[in-house]
């Protein structure tokens, strides 16, 4: 039986297995889901065993475990390393979901007429990494596995992959491969497949602004004592000018500027601004002056408030000057910015702009380096050929605004350019309520991954 025939015959089972994985609320950021995160790791291990891995084990770390698997058919053949993550973002706020986030349902949408799987983690990243396990199973069952394969599926990607670097450094020989496949990105569309060749890095900060030593009556003290919420908002607002240019001194010093030709090529990707605004239900876009929307989310750094709180937020009114105000702020970075340097620049600047009426604290949560990968390597050309085979169209190289910190780690420590082989869409509501992943995307992803192995072996032997 061929790979394609095996996939077709087992479609219902492949889909139901993914739904079972999605029912496990493996939220790494929330300790109350600790047992569920470990349960997801066990699910992945058992899936690798059933698919035909000779080695499938749960590797302990100081945090959540990494699932490692491998099938070495011939040491003289190329080896493919697959990376993914089984942890997911928190589903809050639950009330904004149309269906429970960990009870997956399949519904047709205008973008996914064949149906989409609505569940937390469906696109990021359970649906995408599980495609690789099913492609592996199909190749094993058909006797058509053309390369050696290794898997490294972690459980802390959504909280910064704090323990992955230690695992990689301690297992360089074990993880040695000729190419690394990562499906944690998206395509332009099903009609215009694409391969991501650039990712932004990130520095994630938390700030605390303190005024008085206790909450105060706003009538007695209002106008005489600093309100930390007001001050925090003013400080945040000052970190961008009228052109949406970030005002932190030194912030842009190492930003890699693209040539006119590179920017032109980037903007050749199909993009309809009116459709973009329509999908988001916004009247206009917003961003750094002098750059297109594609450039703003792909090649320019940003600074955004991800959460802000303080004071009284319960029902009714409470006239209070809060003692403290807080915010979480992320900065997306581009080559050649270093997130440690940017975090320090942010802290220095934030403390410098604070008025004497308040005290501030700054904490760096986590970060990651930006990355650019080659669009001429054997791995890229194999991915390009595989997509052209299954989609009937040559994929477009794109740069994506999200961050996958481990890409730079893999480049540095494993000496191999990862191929960012994502099959989601930017409308899949990643990190948001009603996250979903197209059923067709899932199956064409499995087929394309299997095709990649065939093309990678052929191109590697030329």
Image (cartoon, rainbow, N blue to C red):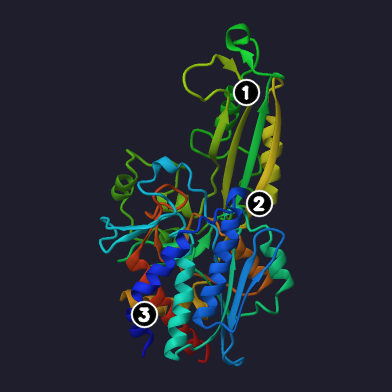
Near mark 3 (Cα within 10 A), the count class, few <14, some 14-19 or many ≥20, is many
Quarter of the picture holding the N terminus: bottom left
| Residue 337 visible to an observer of this rendering | no
Q: Are the residues tagged 1 and 2 within 8 Å (C-beta)? A: no
Residue 228: mark in rendering: 1
Near mark 2 (Cα within 10 A), the count class, few <14, some 14-19 or many ≥20, is many
Per the image, the residue denoted by label 2 is 339
Per the image, the residue denoted by label 3 is 7
- Percent coordinates x, y for residue 173 in the rendering: 70, 79
- Percent coordinates x, y for residue 20 in the rendering: 44, 64
**Numbered disc in front, either 3 or 1:** 3
Q: Secondary structure at mark 1?
A: helix
Q: CA distance from mark 3 to mark 2?
A: 42 Å
In the displayed structure, 89 sits above or below 397; it is above
Q: CA distance from mark 3 to mark 1?
A: 58 Å
How many callouts does the rendering have? 3
Q: Secondary structure at mark 3?
A: helix
N-terminal of the pair, mark 3 or mark 1, is 3
In the displayed structure, 357 sits above or below 162; it is above
Q: Nearer the viewer, residue 415 or 37?
A: 37
**Numbered disc in front, either 3 or 2:** 3
**Numbered disc in front, either 1 or 2:** 1
- Percent coordinates x, y for residue 322 in the rendering: 62, 21
The residue sitting at 57% across, 22% down in the picture is 230
Q: Secondary structure at mark 2?
A: helix
- Percent coordinates x, y for residue 363 in the rendering: 69, 41
Q: Nearer the viewer, residue 75 or 374?
A: 75
Q: Residue furthest right?
A: 170
Near mark 1 (Cα within 10 A), the count class, few <14, some 14-19 or many ≥20, is many
| Residue 132 visible to an observer of this rendering | yes
Q: CA distance from mark 1 to mark 2?
A: 27 Å
């Amino acid at each position: 039986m061929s790979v394609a025939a095996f996939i077709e015959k087992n479609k219902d089972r492949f889909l139901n297995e993914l739904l079972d994985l999605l029912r496990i609320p493996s939220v790494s950021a929330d300790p109350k889901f600790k047992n569920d995160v470990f349960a997801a790791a066990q699910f992945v291990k058992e899936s690798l065993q059933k698919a035909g891995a000779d080695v499938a084990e749960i590797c302990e770390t100081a945090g959540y475990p990494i699932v490692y698997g491998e099938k070495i058919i011939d040491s003289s053949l190329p080896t493919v390393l697959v990376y993914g993550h089984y942890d997911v973002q928190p589903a809050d706020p639950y009330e904004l979901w149309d269906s429970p986030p960990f009870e997956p349902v399949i519904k047709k949408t205008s973008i996914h007429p064949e149906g989409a799987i609505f569940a937390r983690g469906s696109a990021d990243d359970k649906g995408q990494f599980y495609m690789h396990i099913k492609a592996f199973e199909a190749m094993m069952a058909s006797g058509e596995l053309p390369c050696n394969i290794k898997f490294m599926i972690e459980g802390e990607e959504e909280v910064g992959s704090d323990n992955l670097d230690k695992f990689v450094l301690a297992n360089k020989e074990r993880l040695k491969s000729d190419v690394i496949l990562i499906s944690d990105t998206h395509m332009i569309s099903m009609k215009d497949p694409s391969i991501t060749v650039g990712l932004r890095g990130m520095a994630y900060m938390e700030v605390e602004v303190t005024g008085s030593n206790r909450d105060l009556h706003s009538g007695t003290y209002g106008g005489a004592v600093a309100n930390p919420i007001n001050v925090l908002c003013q400080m945040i607002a000052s970190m961008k000018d009228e052109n949406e240019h970030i005002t932190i001194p030194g912030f842009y010093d190492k930003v890699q500027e693209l040539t006119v030709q590179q920017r032109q090529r980037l903007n050749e990707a199909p993009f309809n601004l009116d459709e973009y605004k329509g999908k988001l239900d916004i009247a206009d876009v917003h961003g750094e002056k002098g750059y297109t929307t594609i450039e703003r989310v792909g090649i320019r750094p940003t600074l955004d408030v991800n959460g802000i709180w303080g004071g009284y937020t319960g029902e009714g009114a409470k006239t209070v000057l809060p003692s403290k105000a807080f915010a979480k702020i992320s900065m997306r970075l581009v080559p050649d910015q270093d997130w440690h340097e940017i975090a320090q620049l942010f802290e220095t600047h934030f403390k410098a702009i604070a008025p004497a009426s308040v005290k501030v604290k700054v904490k760096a949560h986590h970060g990651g380096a930006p990355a650019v990968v080659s669009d001429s390597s054997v791995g890229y050309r194999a991915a390009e050929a595989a997509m052209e085979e299954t989609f009937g169209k040559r994929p477009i190289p794109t740069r994506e605004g999200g961050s996958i910190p481990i890409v730079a780690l893999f480049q540095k420590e494993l000496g191999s350019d990862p191929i960012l082989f994502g099959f989601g869409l930017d409308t899949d509501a990643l990190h948001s309520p009603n996250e979903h992943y197209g059923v067709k995307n899932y199956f064409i992803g499995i087929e394309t991954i299997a095709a990649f192995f065939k093309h990678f072996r052929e191109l590697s032997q030329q």
